[in-house]
Amino acid sequence: MHQLLTWVVEPGFFTSEPVRAAVVTGSAVAVVSAVAGIFTVIRGQSFAGHAFGDIAAAGGSGALLLGLSPLTGFIGLGIIGAGAMDLIGVQRVRGRDLATGIVLGAAIGLTALFLYLDTTASATTGAAQQVLFGSIFTTATTTLPVVVTCSVLVAAVIAVIWRPLLLATVSPDIAAARGVPVRLVGMAYMLALATAVGLSSLTIGAILSTALLIGPAATALRLTRRMGWALAAACLIGVAAIWAGILLAYDSYYWGNTHQGLPVSFFIVAVIFAAYLLTGLAGRRPARPHGTAVPSAGDAIRDQVAA
Amino acid sequence: MARQVPVHAPATDVIDVAGVSVSLSGRQVLDDVSFAVGAGEFTGLIGPNGAGKTTLLRVILGLQRPAAGTVALAGQPRSRRGPPVGYVPQKILLDPDLPMRARDLVALGADGHRFGIPVPSRARREAVAEMLHAVGAERFADARAGLLSGGEQQRILIAQALISRPKLLLLDEPLANLDIRSGQEIVTLLARIAREQQVAVLLTAHEINPLLPVMDRVVYLAAGRAASGPASEVITGEVLSRLYGYHVDVLNVHGRVLVVAAPGGAADPTLTASDVAGAG
């Protein structure tokens, strides 16, 4: 038994302080990404979610240049970006992709500049790696309190706007007719999304934050036809991916003879992608003939399992 | 032509539209439109594409401010704090990925405007079940809403609009995406709801014939102007010619109505016979 455990988990895993901090931080980030991600997917705003990743990259590299913590830049510029997208017209469906694309392009340009200056002028070593691909093992211990606080805040905001946001997702017209401040609710959601992406940029990197945002949510939506269960499933998948990713990255140091740990972000994203593929194979919904509205047996079984 | 069920004379009309005019980017869309609908009345808002039907619904919903005129609901000026108005917008197609059963969508109609996460309760479940029964949607209540057919989704959206117990139910082109049979079923359902629940039903359509057997009143909209009353009084060559601003004929063929523009009679060259409502 002990041998099996040391084979799966290499020595020192449970006693390592950075690992413990990474697990807590990563879990908080996974939950918050899943909560924001469910709405991102059903609102069809995956592109905006990805844009926040690029904005976070610009923010993180800019913050390093100013000697600030990358997290400040990840979240700070994300919030400014959300405002900019709203101003250009992200709320109108037609204007949405355009506004997102323009802001995204500007952000990548800034990232290029800031990373160049980071590595040449201020000689911040590893800036590109840290900003683009995350730094969960190196920074988790110090940023743990602020990450957990921000995660709770984001989850609270989405809980408050849950019903109006859902109604506005189904139909902005119905929501407006019921007196929902549709634009305000949409804006609050965008700010929550920007913060969630900022947090996940710190963990697995700005470039890969989209994977943690969209992957678990999209996988969960394949498994259930109820909002609450989709949310629970997305959180579970996200947290499991983080744990598995951290474990594999830790173990990878002992693989072969090179003693070179592989990046944790790669493993997290690989697990998420594998989960998405697996549910796609297992849960392919049988095509239903038009007009016969009977819940599929698969749906019913899955829902019972989820309950 | 109007349904032969006596309508209880209401103390006040459920909705009273008086002298409403709207201009959108310089174009006058509605010009001095007035009509009223009483409790339990089924009213068709008929007109060709671009006549201003959707704009008029948006004014009634309070989503569009009129340049002139007033809208009163149950005798009170329209306001956000006023009584709820049930609304089914046009061309809603639910996303197949939306993780909601039909009954979840109906429940959202009861409390979707409130903040916070939903709290399940017996009262909430029972209200949803009652609405699903009222629209004949129990059979597919547990199916994923986005996978239902157009007619089934329409029923769910009607149940969602009714669950807040509105005195007025507005539907924008509810028949547009439906085949003839589903359309007839929806019309029959709405007429029954109007009668049984004493809800004033106002729906827009560009085709009048499916509504003729059940309509208590028609509001005919053309070129931004409106005429209202029983269909037998409104759908006449004289009234419609005045609205369109050129000569149109109304033909009665086996109980179906055809509205036909005289050749070359269109004062507005952009309007042709095929644009005239009811000609289909």
Image (cartoon, rainbow, N blue to C red):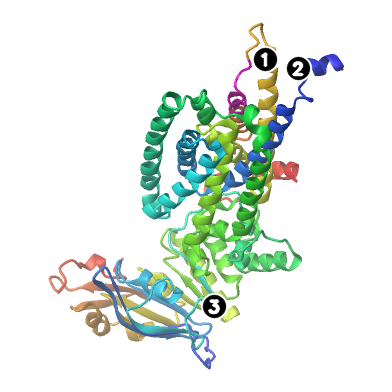
Q: Are marks 2 and 3 on the same chain?
A: no
Q: Amino acid at mark 2?
A: Glu
x then y, percent, for residue A120: 42, 24
Front disc: 3 or 1? 1
Question: In the image shown, does A62 or B74 lie closer to the viewer?
Answer: A62
Question: In the image shown, does B62 or B183 lie closer to the viewer?
Answer: B62
* Whole-number angstrom distance, CA of label 3 to CA of label 1: 63 Å
Callout 3 crowding tier (Cα within 10 Å): few <14, some 14–19, many ≥20: few
- Secondary element at tag 1: loop
Please give the range of residues in magenta.
A261-271
Front disc: 2 or 3? 2
Q: Residue at 61% of width from left, 18% of height from top?
A: A262
Q: Which residue is mark 3?
A: B81
Q: Residue at 73% of width from left, 43% of height from top?
A: A306
Q: Quadrant of the C terminus of chain B?
A: bottom left
Q: What secondary structure prevails in the magenta region?
A: helix
Q: Are marks 3 and 1 on the same chain?
A: no
Q: Is residue A1 above or below residue A85?
A: above
Determine which of the numbered discs, if any, sits on residue A253 in the image: 1
Determine which of the numbered discs, if any, sits on residue A10 in the image: 2
Question: In the image shown, does B24 or B269 lie closer to the viewer?
Answer: B24
